[in-house]
Protein backbone atom coordinates (compact mmCIF):
# COMPACT_ATOMS: atom_id res chain seq x y z
CA UNK A 1 0.00 0.00 0.00
CA UNK A 2 1.93 3.02 -1.28
CA UNK A 3 1.81 6.05 0.99
CA UNK A 4 3.42 9.41 1.44
CA UNK A 5 5.51 9.45 4.60
CA UNK A 6 6.50 12.48 6.62
CA UNK A 7 8.95 12.94 9.45
CA UNK A 8 8.84 14.00 12.16
CA UNK A 9 5.17 13.61 13.01
CA UNK A 10 5.43 16.10 15.83
CA UNK A 11 8.00 18.79 16.49
CA UNK A 12 8.21 21.24 19.36
CA UNK A 13 10.91 23.83 19.14
CA UNK A 14 11.81 27.24 20.44
CA UNK A 15 11.62 30.46 18.52
CA UNK A 16 14.73 31.07 16.46
CA UNK A 17 15.59 27.43 15.97
CA UNK A 18 15.91 25.78 12.58
CA UNK A 19 13.24 23.23 11.66
CA UNK A 20 13.51 20.68 8.87
CA UNK A 21 10.56 18.59 7.78
CA UNK A 22 10.97 15.65 5.43
CA UNK A 23 8.68 13.94 2.99
CA UNK A 24 9.02 10.75 1.01
CA UNK A 25 6.62 10.84 -1.93
CA UNK A 26 5.04 7.74 -3.40
CA UNK A 27 7.54 5.95 -5.60
CA UNK A 28 7.06 6.96 -9.20
CA UNK A 29 5.18 10.17 -8.49
CA UNK A 30 6.71 13.18 -10.20
CA UNK A 31 4.95 16.03 -8.42
CA UNK A 32 5.34 17.00 -4.77
CA UNK A 33 3.33 19.63 -2.89
CA UNK A 34 3.82 21.29 0.49
CA UNK A 35 0.75 22.63 2.33
CA UNK A 36 0.28 24.31 5.69
CA UNK A 37 -2.89 24.10 7.76
CA UNK A 38 -3.93 26.36 10.60
CA UNK A 39 -7.29 27.01 12.20
CA UNK A 40 -7.27 30.59 11.01
CA UNK A 41 -6.07 30.15 7.42
CA UNK A 42 -7.13 26.63 6.63
CA UNK A 43 -5.11 24.65 4.07
CA UNK A 44 -2.64 26.75 2.09
CA UNK A 45 -0.31 25.65 -0.68
CA UNK A 46 3.25 26.70 0.06
CA UNK A 47 5.16 25.25 -2.89
CA UNK A 48 5.25 22.45 -5.38
CA UNK A 49 7.76 20.61 -7.54
CA UNK A 50 7.55 18.69 -10.79
CA UNK A 51 10.37 16.27 -11.60
CA UNK A 52 12.29 17.83 -8.69
CA UNK A 53 12.16 21.34 -10.18
CA UNK A 54 10.25 24.03 -8.27
CA UNK A 55 7.18 25.13 -10.21
CA UNK A 56 5.58 27.52 -7.78
CA UNK A 57 6.65 28.72 -4.36
CA UNK A 58 4.58 31.89 -4.28
CA UNK A 59 2.76 30.76 -1.16
CA UNK A 60 5.92 30.46 0.85
CA UNK A 61 7.47 33.23 2.98
CA UNK A 62 10.77 33.60 1.18
CA UNK A 63 12.79 35.09 3.98
CA UNK A 64 12.64 32.11 6.29
CA UNK A 65 11.22 29.16 4.36
CA UNK A 66 12.97 27.02 1.80
CA UNK A 67 11.88 23.87 -0.01
CA UNK A 68 14.07 21.45 -1.91
CA UNK A 69 14.08 18.03 -3.51
CA UNK A 70 17.58 16.60 -3.15
CA UNK A 71 16.43 13.52 -5.02
CA UNK A 72 13.23 11.95 -6.30
CA UNK A 73 12.59 10.16 -3.01
CA UNK A 74 13.01 13.09 -0.65
CA UNK A 75 11.48 16.54 -0.31
CA UNK A 76 12.42 18.90 2.49
CA UNK A 77 10.85 22.02 3.94
CA UNK A 78 13.07 24.13 6.13
CA UNK A 79 12.25 27.06 8.37
CA UNK A 80 15.11 29.19 9.65
CA UNK A 81 14.62 30.93 11.99
CA UNK A 82 11.29 29.60 13.21
CA UNK A 83 8.67 31.87 14.79
CA UNK A 84 5.56 31.12 16.89
CA UNK A 85 3.33 32.08 13.93
CA UNK A 86 4.80 29.13 12.01
CA UNK A 87 3.00 26.75 14.34
CA UNK A 88 0.78 24.63 12.11
CA UNK A 89 0.38 21.21 10.56
CA UNK A 90 2.51 20.85 7.45
CA UNK A 91 1.33 18.37 4.84
CA UNK A 92 3.24 16.91 1.97
CA UNK A 93 1.37 15.45 -1.00
CA UNK A 94 2.50 13.71 -4.15
CA UNK A 95 0.91 12.96 -7.49
CA UNK A 96 1.65 11.61 -10.92
CA UNK A 97 1.29 14.21 -13.61
CA UNK A 98 0.62 12.52 -16.93
CA UNK A 99 -0.21 15.55 -19.02
CA UNK A 100 -3.84 14.55 -19.06
CA UNK A 101 -6.52 17.11 -18.46
CA UNK A 102 -8.16 16.44 -15.15
CA UNK A 103 -5.17 14.62 -13.78
CA UNK A 104 -4.83 16.24 -10.38
CA UNK A 105 -5.20 13.49 -7.79
CA UNK A 106 -2.94 14.23 -4.88
CA UNK A 107 -2.01 11.78 -2.14
CA UNK A 108 -1.40 13.41 1.20
CA UNK A 109 0.90 12.36 3.99
CA UNK A 110 -0.08 12.32 7.67
CA UNK A 111 1.44 15.73 8.31
CA UNK A 112 4.01 17.20 10.69
CA UNK A 113 2.56 19.09 13.62
CA UNK A 114 4.94 21.96 14.39
CA UNK A 115 4.78 23.97 17.59
CA UNK A 116 7.12 26.92 17.96
CA UNK A 117 7.29 28.27 21.50
CA UNK B 1 -9.50 29.61 -10.46
CA UNK B 2 -13.24 29.70 -9.94
CA UNK B 3 -14.45 29.92 -6.36
CA UNK B 4 -16.77 27.47 -4.71
CA UNK B 5 -19.48 27.96 -2.11
CA UNK B 6 -20.44 25.23 0.34
CA UNK B 7 -22.72 25.26 3.38
CA UNK B 8 -20.65 25.17 6.57
CA UNK B 9 -22.12 21.95 7.88
CA UNK B 10 -24.69 19.24 7.53
CA UNK B 11 -25.54 15.96 9.12
CA UNK B 12 -27.15 12.73 8.11
CA UNK B 13 -28.09 9.43 9.66
CA UNK B 14 -25.84 6.42 9.36
CA UNK B 15 -26.85 4.24 6.44
CA UNK B 16 -28.61 7.03 4.60
CA UNK B 17 -27.32 8.88 1.57
CA UNK B 18 -25.39 12.07 2.22
CA UNK B 19 -25.82 14.70 -0.49
CA UNK B 20 -23.22 17.46 -0.26
CA UNK B 21 -23.89 20.51 -2.43
CA UNK B 22 -21.40 22.88 -4.00
CA UNK B 23 -21.92 26.03 -6.04
CA UNK B 24 -19.35 27.10 -8.61
CA UNK B 25 -21.20 29.58 -10.78
CA UNK B 26 -18.06 31.13 -12.28
CA UNK B 27 -16.54 27.85 -13.44
CA UNK B 28 -14.73 27.99 -16.78
CA UNK B 29 -15.02 25.50 -19.59
CA UNK B 30 -11.67 23.89 -18.89
CA UNK B 31 -12.11 23.62 -15.13
CA UNK B 32 -12.81 20.38 -13.34
CA UNK B 33 -14.69 19.84 -10.10
CA UNK B 34 -12.71 17.93 -7.48
CA UNK B 35 -13.80 16.63 -4.12
CA UNK B 36 -11.45 15.86 -1.27
CA UNK B 37 -12.19 15.09 2.34
CA UNK B 38 -10.24 15.42 5.55
CA UNK B 39 -10.96 13.19 8.48
CA UNK B 40 -9.91 14.65 11.81
CA UNK B 41 -6.13 14.68 12.33
CA UNK B 42 -5.42 13.16 8.93
CA UNK B 43 -4.28 14.52 5.59
CA UNK B 44 -6.87 15.25 2.92
CA UNK B 45 -8.01 12.35 0.77
CA UNK B 46 -9.03 12.48 -2.87
CA UNK B 47 -12.59 11.32 -3.52
CA UNK B 48 -13.62 12.00 -7.08
CA UNK B 49 -13.50 14.53 -9.89
CA UNK B 50 -15.46 15.37 -13.04
CA UNK B 51 -15.78 17.80 -15.91
CA UNK B 52 -19.26 17.54 -17.40
CA UNK B 53 -20.55 14.04 -16.98
CA UNK B 54 -21.64 12.43 -13.78
CA UNK B 55 -18.98 10.22 -12.27
CA UNK B 56 -19.06 7.29 -9.87
CA UNK B 57 -16.35 5.35 -8.11
CA UNK B 58 -16.14 3.07 -5.11
CA UNK B 59 -16.34 5.99 -2.70
CA UNK B 60 -18.97 8.31 -4.09
CA UNK B 61 -20.93 9.73 -7.01
CA UNK B 62 -20.55 13.20 -8.44
CA UNK B 63 -23.51 14.85 -10.10
CA UNK B 64 -22.75 17.99 -12.12
CA UNK B 65 -25.59 20.13 -13.40
CA UNK B 66 -25.88 20.66 -17.12
CA UNK B 67 -24.82 24.31 -16.86
CA UNK B 68 -21.92 23.16 -14.61
CA UNK B 69 -22.66 25.89 -12.08
CA UNK B 70 -23.21 23.46 -9.25
CA UNK B 71 -22.55 19.90 -8.27
CA UNK B 72 -23.47 17.37 -5.61
CA UNK B 73 -21.29 14.75 -4.01
CA UNK B 74 -23.29 11.72 -2.97
CA UNK B 75 -22.14 9.20 -0.39
CA UNK B 76 -24.73 6.49 -0.98
CA UNK B 77 -24.63 4.82 2.44
CA UNK B 78 -22.94 7.08 4.95
CA UNK B 79 -21.08 5.50 7.86
CA UNK B 80 -19.69 7.03 11.03
CA UNK B 81 -16.24 6.94 9.39
CA UNK B 82 -17.47 9.36 6.74
CA UNK B 83 -17.61 12.14 9.34
CA UNK B 84 -15.13 14.65 7.93
CA UNK B 85 -14.68 18.02 6.25
CA UNK B 86 -15.45 17.76 2.54
CA UNK B 87 -13.84 20.19 0.13
CA UNK B 88 -15.22 21.06 -3.28
CA UNK B 89 -12.47 22.52 -5.48
CA UNK B 90 -12.51 23.84 -9.01
CA UNK B 91 -9.32 23.95 -11.05
CA UNK B 92 -8.11 23.46 -14.60
CA UNK B 93 -6.83 19.97 -13.92
CA UNK B 94 -3.35 18.76 -14.71
CA UNK B 95 -0.50 20.90 -13.45
CA UNK B 96 -2.81 22.94 -11.28
CA UNK B 97 -2.75 24.03 -7.71
CA UNK B 98 -5.58 22.97 -5.43
CA UNK B 99 -7.07 25.87 -3.50
CA UNK B 100 -8.89 24.57 -0.45
CA UNK B 101 -11.73 26.64 0.98
CA UNK B 102 -13.44 26.05 4.30
CA UNK B 103 -15.29 22.98 3.10
CA UNK B 104 -18.43 21.47 4.58
CA UNK B 105 -18.35 19.53 7.81
CA UNK B 106 -20.38 16.36 7.49
CA UNK B 107 -21.46 14.71 10.73
CA UNK B 108 -22.88 11.22 10.43
CA UNK B 109 -25.01 10.34 13.42
CA UNK B 110 -25.74 6.80 14.62
Image (spheres, rainbow, N blue to C red):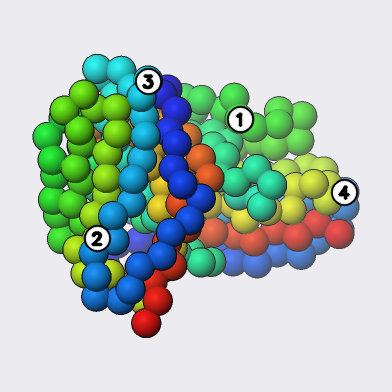
Which residue is denoted by mark 4 in the rendering? A16
The residue marked by circle 3 belongs to what chain? B
The answer to whether marks 4 and 3 sit on the same chain is no
* CA neighbours of label 2 inside 10 A, class few (<14), some (14 to 19), many (20+): some
Q: CA distance from mark 1 to mark 3?
A: 24 Å
Q: Quadrant of the N terminus of chain B?
A: top left
Residues at badges 4 and 3 in contact (C-beta under 8 Å)?
no
Label 2: which secondary element: strand
**Which residue is located at x 72 percent, y 44 percent?**
A79
Which residue is denoted by mark 2 in the rendering? B75
* CA neighbours of label 3 inside 10 A, class few (<14), some (14 to 19), many (20+): some
Expressed as whole percent of the image width and height from the top left, the position of residue B103 reads 47, 47
Residues at badges 4 and 2 in contact (C-beta under 8 Å)?
no
Which residue is denoted by mark 1 in the rendering? A59
* CA neighbours of label 4 inside 10 A, class few (<14), some (14 to 19), many (20+): some
Q: Is residue A101 visible?
A: no
Q: Is residue B84 left or right of residue A44?
A: left
The answer to whether marks 1 and 3 sit on the same chain is no
Which residue is denoted by mark 3 in the rendering? B26
Q: Quadrant of the C terminus of chain B?
A: bottom left
Expressed as whole percent of the image width and height from the top left, the position of residue B46 reads 32, 51
Q: Residue furthest bottom?
A: B110
Q: Is residue B62 above or below residue B91?
A: below
Q: Residue furthest top?
A: B29
Expressed as whole percent of the image width and height from the top left, the position of residue A2 reads 29, 62
**Which residue is located at x 13 percent, y 50 percent?**
B56
Expressed as whole percent of the image width and height from the top left, the position of residue B25 reads 36, 24
**Which residue is located at x 24 percent, y 70 percent?**
B16
Q: CA distance from mark 4 to mark 3?
A: 44 Å
Whichever of callouts 4 and 1 sits on the residue coming sooner in the sequence is 4
Amino acid sequence: DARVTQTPRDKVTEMGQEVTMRCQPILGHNTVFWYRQTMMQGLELLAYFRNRAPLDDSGMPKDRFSAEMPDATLATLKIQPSEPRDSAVYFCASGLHKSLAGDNEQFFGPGTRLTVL
Amino acid sequence: DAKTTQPPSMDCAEGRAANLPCNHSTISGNEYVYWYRQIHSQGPQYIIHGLKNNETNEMASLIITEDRKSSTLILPHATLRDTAVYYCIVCPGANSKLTFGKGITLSVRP
